[in-house]
Amino acid sequence: MWFAYLWRAEFSNGKKITQDPEDLYSKHNSKAEYNPSSFRDFLDYQEEHPNVRLVKFCIFNNEKTYTVSFENPKRPVIYYDENNRYGIPTKHYEWFKCKRDLENVRPIYYRRMEKNLQTQETKILHYVIGFQGNEENGNNFKKELKVV
């Protein structure tokens, strides 16, 4: 499967985890009946390093990057960057900036997919990136950006 965007996670200790271009988990076993996607590498790292903070989570290709910044862990920011054909940054837009403090903030990432049951062909309809957290009153707050 070909991906229009790959994901990358950046942590406060400098560690970066980037999606495998074939979306293979680092512990992929070709003989296993089921293997998780490479997103499992991100989840494993967070579980194994609970004191290392996620700083950025983005989806990107050669021209565009959509980023959720957790620099301020209680007030995430979603922004968009674009490069020209030479790879030089040309645009930077802040799409959403959280104006209230949140607790238990975590990234949102998924791909909406469709499968043709006759041909078994799978295609990605769009990507979703964002964040969710809990407000002071306990309500869940989330913000998502659909990337086509």
Image: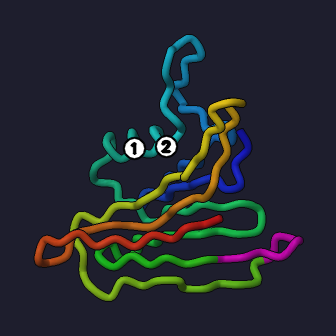
Helix, strand or loop at mark 1: helix
Q: Residue furthest top?
A: 31
Residue that label 1 marks: 43
Task: Tell me the residue at 54%/31% (across/down).
Answer: 26
Residue 42 placement: quadrant = top left
Looking at the image, residue 96 lies above or below residue 148: below
Instruction: Give the main secondary structure of the magenta stretch.
Output: loop
Q: Residue furthest left?
A: 137
Task: Tell me the residue at 31%/42% (across/down).
Answer: 47
Q: Residue 124: image x %, image y %?
A: 64, 50
Looking at the image, residue 90 lies above or below residue 60: below
Residue 11 placement: quadrant = bottom left
Identify which residue, 11 or 95, lies in the foreground: 95
Residue 140 placement: quadrant = bottom left
Task: Tell me the residue at 28%/49% (across/down).
Answer: 50
Q: How many marks?
A: 2
Tell whether position 138 is magenta.
no
Residue that label 2 marks: 39
Looking at the image, residue 41 lies above or below residue 133: above
Give the extent of the magenta segment. Answer: 81-88
Q: Residue 15: image x %, image y %?
A: 49, 52
Quadrant of the drawing holding the C terminus: bottom right
Identify which residue, 13 or 46, lies in the foreground: 46
Q: Residue 93: image x %, image y %?
A: 61, 85
